[in-house]
Image (spheres, rainbow, N blue to C red):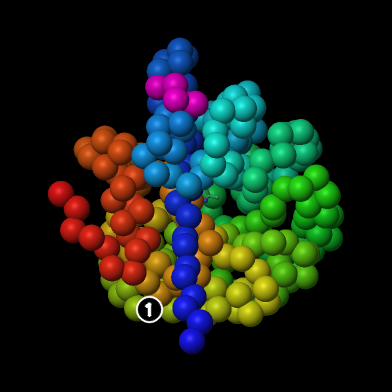
Amino acid sequence: MTLIVFMTKLSVNINKIATLRNARGGNIPDVVKVALDCEKFGAQGITVHPRPDERHIRFKDVYDLKAKIKTELNIEGYPSQKFVDLITTIRPTQVTLVPDKPDAITSNAGWDTIENQQLLSDLVDEFKAVGVRTSIFTGTDLKIIEFAAKTGTDRIELYTEPYASDYSKDKEAAIASFIEAAKYAKKLGLGVNAGHDLSLENLHFLYKNIPWLDEVSIGHALISDALYLGLEKTIKAYKNCLKETPELLD
Ligand SMILES: CC(=O)[C@@H](O)[C@H](O)COP(=O)(O)O
Ligand SMILES: NCC(=O)COP(=O)(O)O
């Protein structure tokens, strides 16, 4: 009998730390220090999502982070020429392509991988040629996932906002399309990441139903929880949700 052991990595999105820093113009809080502390407290990756107006993570931050962090660096964003140059220069562990408009408050949809097939395929080729793992942000539509796989991408990232917002109404209904999508992606040979609006409330149920998730990237709720619990306890609490049987934490 073969025992399959899954491990879903927690990548902490530190955009909100940069938002706080930018409010005053100095270097408090220090984004790189927070990233290193996240790693010290157990984060298995750091995610950043630079946007064209640099209202939170700045392009310079990404260089500083790459030089210092020891875990996986995941850079998410819309593939403008500036973003593509950043990725090919920095060569992070992973790039996640997100179709958000420059003025979007936050990411609010996955790619139409059918309409953008050529664009995405070319980008995947370009990034894989320089050794960067690729991930494409998608919804749960199976046709969209099929066409994501056709680009040659290593992974997809499932956009979990619809799951998070429906969770409190009916969690079984909220997760159903995500299980189906993640099963299909796995069958097509894709790795599966997930992110957006994941929280201490909804994370364990996601993990329990899709234990083969490779990575979850979490920022907004995690950084907000850290205001009450502190960063160390918060990261431990999120990692605890990524266990088959979470422990009782104090
Ligand atoms: C792709 C995705 O869902 C995240 O990168 C999200 O956009 C986080 O960015 P903000 O923290 O700026 O909302
Ligand atoms: N890819 C999702 C991400 O990085 C964080 O999203 P959120 O937890 O800030 O909603």
Q: Nearer the viewer, residue 131 or 138?
A: 131
Residue 220: give x, y in percent of width and height.
Answer: 39, 44
Q: Residue furthest bottom?
A: 1
Residue 130: give x, y in percent of width and height.
Answer: 80, 45
Circle 1 Cα neighbour tier, 10 Å, few/some/many (<14 / 14–19 / ≥20): few
Name the residue carrying label 1. Answer: 173
Q: Is residue 48 above or below residue 162?
A: above
- Report the residue at 60% width, 35% height from top: 50
Q: Nearer the viewer, residue 153 or 105?
A: 153
Q: Quick check: is 32 in the magenta stretch?
A: yes
Amino acid of disc 1: Ala
Is residue 132 visible in the rendered image? The answer is yes
Q: Answer left or right for 228 relative to 46.
A: left
Numbered range of the magenta stretch: 29-33
Q: Nearer the viewer, residue 119 or 234?
A: 234
- Report the residue at 77% width, 38% height from top: 88
Q: Answer left or right for 82 relative to 110.
A: right
Residue 25: give x, y in percent of width and height.
Answer: 47, 14
Q: Quick check: is 15 in the magenta stretch?
A: no
Q: Secondary structure at mark 1?
A: helix
Q: Is residue 240 above or below residue 232?
A: below
Residue 155: give x, y in percent of width and height.
Answer: 64, 62
Q: Which of the 4 image quadrants contains residue 116? A: bottom right
Q: Residue furthest left?
A: 250
- Report the residue at 40% width, 26% height from top: 20
Q: How many marks?
A: 1
Q: Residue furthest front?
A: 1
Q: Is mark 1 within 8 Å of ligand 2?
A: no
Q: Answer left or right for 176 relative to 103.
A: left
Magenta residues, dominant SS class: helix
Q: Is residue 12 above or below residue 194?
A: above
